[in-house]
């Protein structure tokens, strides 16, 4: 629930500011099969794992989903992604969403990671999209969709007013299904 609340706070802060923004939602469902082992071994080395440990992890395929170490190895890869996103914001190549109120210190959120779901928050400016001005065209090339708020994240709508009854319909339906057996 914390992830959903954080996403809603980011979206609500942007809506209250009346500024437009861009949210890229990445579902890395099959990412385990595509982990670059050279990169993963590099990350293990950077985290202090010696050659003995690296030999233990080596594989010709991606991180296997049934392997008990897979979640930890995936976290290492996502940690690198998170640090790259932070460096992008620090170098002013991208700006995230400012979250908070004028009475408290604002915090900039550029991305949120939860399991295999990633959200990237940025300004809808061509400079931040690296020469990609046509978002609709890009979505066709990547085979993804363009949506607006509210949108579903982890099964709940994000960006909807919390008092709207429709946001709870999916949750109520899932609970009723589980109770029915």
Image: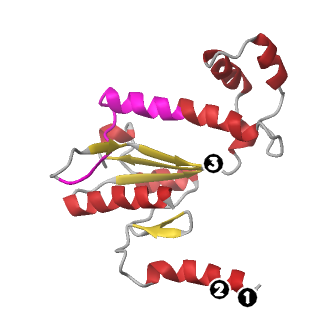
User: What residue is disc 3 on?
Assistant: 28
Magenta stretch bounds: 81-101
Q: Residue at x 52, y 46 (%)?
A: 113
Residue 34, position as x, y percentages in the image: 72, 38
User: Is 99 inside the magenta-drawn segment?
Assistant: yes
Instruction: Please say if the residues under marks 2 and 3 sit with CB atoms less than 8 Å apart.
Output: no
Considering only vertical position in the picture, is 110 above or below 9? above
Instruction: Please say if the residues under marks 1 and 2 sit with CB atoms less than 8 Å apart.
Output: yes
User: Is 104 inside the magenta-drawn segment?
Assistant: no
Q: Residue at x 38, y 81 (%)?
A: 164
Closest to the observer, 81 or 132: 81
Looking at the rendered structure, which numbered label has been put on residue 176? 2
Q: Earlier in the sequence, mark 3 or mark 1?
A: 3
- 119 to the left or right of 116: left
Closest to the observer, 74 or 103: 103
Foreground: disc 3 or disc 1: 1
Residue 18 in view, yes or no = no
User: What residue is disc 1 on?
Assistant: 180
Residue 8, position as x, y percentages in the image: 39, 62
């Amino acid at each position: 629930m914390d992830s959903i609340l954080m996403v809603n706070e980011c979206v609500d802060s942007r809506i209250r500011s009346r500024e437009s923004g861009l949210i890229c939602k990445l579902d890395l469902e099959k990412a385990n099969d595509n982990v670059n082992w050279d990169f993963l071994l590099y990350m293990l080395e950077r985290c202090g794992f010696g050659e003995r440990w690296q030999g233990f992890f080596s594989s010709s395929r991606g991180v296997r989903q049934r392997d008990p170490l897979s979640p930890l190895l995936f976290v290492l890869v996502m940690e690198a992604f998170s640090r790259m996103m932070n460096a992008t914001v620090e170098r002013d190549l991208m700006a995230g969403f400012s979250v908070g109120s004028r009475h408290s210190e604002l915090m900039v959120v550029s991305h949120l990671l939860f399991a295999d779901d990633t959200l990237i928050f940025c300004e809808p400016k061509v400079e931040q999209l690296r020469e990609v001005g046509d978002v609709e065209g890009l979505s066709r090339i990547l085979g993804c969709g363009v949506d607006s708020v509210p949108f579903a994240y982890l099964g709940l709508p994000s960006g909807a007013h919390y008092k709207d009854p429709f946001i709870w319909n999916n949750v109520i339906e899932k609970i009723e299904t589980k109770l029915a057996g």
